[in-house]
């Protein structure tokens, strides 16, 4: 063979390659969240696409999203307005979004990949149905049935999916039914732990929507939204600042809130399990969706730029940063919407303010160790305030504590079987008493018995 | 409770009934699942009641009994009722891992019944996890533990305690009410079964874990028996089908509370059964004695399994 101007290597993709690529690097949980995002975007569109900050009084209680996940099938249905036929023809089923495509204001969906990726990850027998109100006031319904095995069998372009007429759904919305689940999906939906964790993730990541009345239910049970609260009192007040920024001509509104959500732990031992620990750290919210929760890594800054690495001593801190933009492409989130794009300019510009409030908290927890009793006393006077009700304030307020000289101390460390410790803890007042406290109480008990008053 | 209802405690008729129900049910499974050459593993103590049943009802020969206590071990060896019972000295958490490596049994289906007398705790949970992660295909795992609410701390501590023990499967909104009185045993049974199912699912056990046993019984303290089948991939559907039929006996709706009866009372009542009509209190009175309605109902439900205990050596 001779090489000439027409000699080219074939670079056409196959469908199978595409499907493998787009589904491999995303978790099943994130795929389901992608489908919820689509529904949420629908609700938001129906409500007139307003900014998704904290203050706006939007009521989403008319909208509901029902998810049913069993080892045999998966279904998500909503009454959030539905997908239009034009959207289905031009965008929803194409791989990637044309650069010039219009976007829904204040939406979360941005890459035009979520729904396909999700359904391919879930199973091979798929039916997507939509009922919506056309601009001329006529209700229209259609369905897109996909048999993945058949579809993969033919790589010849053009790649497309059939759209067929369909009966109307009870309410305008989208209904996605997946059967012949993939082994991964089947296994996950068979696990009560997976289902409970999915419930927790939804409660957290959509807490802003759930708190506005949106109903999301999983296997028949409605999910309550997380209440994010900070503590406020005479010596404590969270910071709350807001400023506009801009990315390639798109305006992005940034809001940062941070402060104490709970007093720091009594002990910084890393081996003590503390459920509350999961709540603390930085939260990043893009157009109302929590894309990063309770982060303690370099993504939010810990362990970089002179911030120390996260340590249990810093537990109790919660920081929230909200990015709101009409064009979702301007938001600093990754395609999986599960993390922050740390190279984003708007995010990098916000980092110094995030660092400042974090730094103040770190300093406080250090100072606190020298004046523990005083700290506990003032911390106890602070009361919870809802995220929505935090007052505007340029910097966080934390008490100044005066260190008191302390007696030299001995640290005691010993190991006993857990079962025995639990039994003793129960007798000392609570089976869930921290190990450290069981140790102290038993020391006091023995001291009182054997030494008595000096 | 009047003392004559409690006096038979050491003989534990309810425990005996639940054991019979389980062994009979497992026998029906033997017909449909590949359970030949099964190995029985449990805590035979010095009585080995379940071992004798495993041999006689299920035809199991190979049996392993785990015994932690020093004196108990010597007595267990002395009391082993069959030549094929192997007593191993040590805590279950140490002995179980050695069995996973045991050439003689590691490729055969196991019937593991960890019959603890204490509450669900960290050790017990770790044993459950370890068996689900390592037992051969087509094995059964049953676990019995004390479900008395007070064993799990004060009411306000219990939801948190369960979360500590069973982790993610425990709903964040688990209420105090779900952890009180008789509800506590139901909650423990459901969540522990969820835990077992999740361990198998997370590990992608080829046939998964099919929750099949859920019995609560009460002689003294309320006890919870839960368990399931870890079928081979091919047997998963049939195992699921058998154990989800209405006739599957190992998920009784109500706790088993067997009345404490004398041999004469039990024999007299039995002589009236089976019968299409319900046995009434009126009828019992006519027989010459009396029982509470609840006791009559329980006897009628379980008389086929009601044990006959008698002192044989004075």
Image (tube, rainbow, N blue to C red):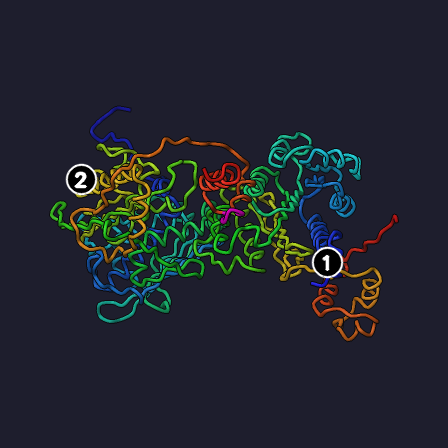
Q: Residues within 10 Å of mark 1 (few under 14, many from 20)?
A: some
Q: Position of residue B21 (x, y in %)?
A: 71, 54
Work out whether B39 lies above or below B30: above
- For the C terminus of chain A, give its image quadrant: top left
Q: Position of residue B129 (x, y in %)?
A: 55, 41
Q: Main secondary structure of the magenta part?
A: loop
A427 in magenta: yes
Q: Mark 2 falls within which chain?
A: A
Q: Position of residue A243 (x, y in %)?
A: 14, 50
Q: Position of residue B56 (x, y in %)?
A: 79, 46
Tags 1 and 2 both on a single chain: no
Label disc, if present, on residue A352 of the rendered structure = 2
Determine the CA span between mark 1 and mark 2. Answer: 71 Å
Say what secondary structure mark 1 lies in.
helix
Label disc, if present, on residue B6 of the rendered structure = 1
Q: Is residue B226 left or right of residue A452?
A: right
- For the magenta stretch, what is the residue range? A426-431
């Amino acid at each position: 063979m001779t090489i000439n101007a027409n000699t080219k290597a074939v670079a056409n993709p196959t469908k199978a390659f595409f499907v493998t690529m787009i589904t491999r690097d995303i978790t099943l949980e994130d795929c389901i969240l992608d489908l919820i995002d689509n529904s949420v975007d629908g609700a938001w569109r129906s409500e007139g696409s307003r900014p998704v900050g904290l203050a706006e009084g939007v009521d989403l209680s008319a909208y509901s999203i029902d998810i049913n996940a069993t080892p045999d099938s998966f279904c998500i249905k909503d009454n959030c307005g539905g997908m239009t036929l034009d959207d289905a023809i031009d965008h929803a089923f194409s791989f990637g979004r044309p650069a010039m495509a219009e976007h829904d204001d204040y939406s979360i969906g941005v890459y035009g990949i979520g729904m396909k990726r999700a359904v391919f990850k879930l199973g091979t027998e798929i039916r997507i149905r939509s009922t919506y109100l056309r601009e001329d006031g006529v209700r229209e319904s259609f369905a897109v049935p996909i048999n993945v095995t058949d579809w993969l069998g033919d790589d010849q372009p053009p790649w497309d999916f059939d759209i067929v007429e369909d009966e109307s759904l009870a309410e305008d919305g989208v209904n996605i039914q997946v059967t012949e689940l993939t082994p991964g999906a089947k296994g996950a939906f068979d696990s009560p732990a997976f289902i409970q964790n999915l419930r927790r993730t939804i409660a957290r990541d959509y807490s802003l929507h759930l708190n506005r009345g949106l109903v999301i239910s999983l296997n028949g049970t409605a999910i309550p939204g997380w209440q994010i609260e900070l503590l406020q009192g005479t010596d404590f007040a969270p910071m709350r600042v807001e400023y506009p920024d801009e990315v390639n001509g798109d305006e992005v509104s940034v809001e940062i809130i941070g402060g104490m959500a709970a007093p720091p732990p009594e002990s910084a031992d890393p081996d003590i399990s503390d459920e509350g620990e999961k709540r603390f750290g930085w939260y990043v919210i893009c157009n109302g969706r929590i894309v990063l929760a309770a982060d303690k890594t370099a993504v939010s800054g810990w362990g970089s730029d002179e911030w120390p690495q996260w340590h249990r001593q810093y537990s109790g801190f919660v920081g929230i940063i909200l990015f709101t933009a009409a064009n979702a492409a301007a938001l600093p989130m990754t395609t999986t919407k599960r993390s922050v794009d740390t190279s984003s300019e708007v995010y990098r510009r916000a980092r110094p303010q995030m660092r400042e409030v974090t730094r103040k908290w770190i300093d406080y927890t250090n100072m606190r160790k020298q004046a523990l009793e005083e700290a506990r006393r003032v911390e106890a006077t602070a009361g919870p305030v809802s995220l929505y009700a935090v007052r505007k304030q340029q910097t966080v307020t934390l008490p100044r504590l005066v260190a008191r000289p302390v007696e030299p101390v001995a640290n005691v460390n010993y190991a006993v079987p857990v079962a025995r410790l639990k039994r003793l803890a129960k007798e000392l007042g609570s089976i869930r008493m921290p190990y450290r406290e069981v140790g102290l109480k038993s020391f006091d008990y023995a001291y009182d018995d054997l030494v008595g008053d000096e | 409770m009047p003392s004559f209802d409690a006096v038979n405690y050491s003989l534990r008729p309810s425990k005996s009934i639940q054991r019979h129900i389980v062994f009979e049910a497992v026998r029906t499974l033997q017909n449909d699942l590949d359970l030949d050459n099964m190995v029985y593993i449990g805590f035979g103590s010095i009585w080995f009641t379940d071992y004798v049943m495993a041999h006689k009802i299920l035809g199991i020969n190979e049996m392993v009994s785990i015994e932690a206590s020093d004196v108990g071990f010597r007595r267990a060896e002395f009391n082993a009722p069959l030549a094929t019972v192997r007593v191993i000295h040590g805590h279950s958490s140490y002995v179980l891992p050695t069995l996973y490596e045991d050439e003689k049994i590691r490729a055969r289906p196991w019937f593991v019944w960890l019959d603890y007398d204490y509450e669900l705790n960290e050790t017990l949970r770790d044993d459950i996890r370890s068996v689900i992660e390592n037992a051969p295909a087509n094995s059964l795992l049953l676990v019995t533990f004390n479900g008395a609410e007070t064993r799990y701390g004060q009411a306000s501590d219990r939801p948190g305690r369960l979360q500590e023990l069973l982790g993610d499967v425990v709903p964040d909104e688990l209420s105090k009410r779900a952890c009180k009185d008789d509800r506590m045993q139901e909650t423990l049974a459901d969540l522990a079964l969820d835990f077992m199912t999740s361990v198998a699912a997370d590990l992608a056990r080829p046939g998964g874990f099919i929750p099949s046993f859920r019995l609560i019984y009460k002689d003294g303290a309320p006890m919870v028996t839960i368990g399931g089948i870890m079928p081979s991939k091919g047997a998963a559907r049939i195992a699921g089908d058998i154990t989800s039929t209405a006739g599957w006996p190992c998920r009784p709706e109500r706790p088993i509370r067997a009345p404490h009866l004398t041999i004469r009372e039990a024999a007299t009542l039995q002589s009236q059964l089976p019968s299409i009509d319900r046995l009434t209190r009126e009828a019992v009175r006519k027989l010459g004695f009396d029982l509470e309605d609840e006791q009559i109902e329980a006897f009628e439900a379980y008389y086929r399994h009601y044990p006959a205990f008698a002192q044989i050596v004075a």
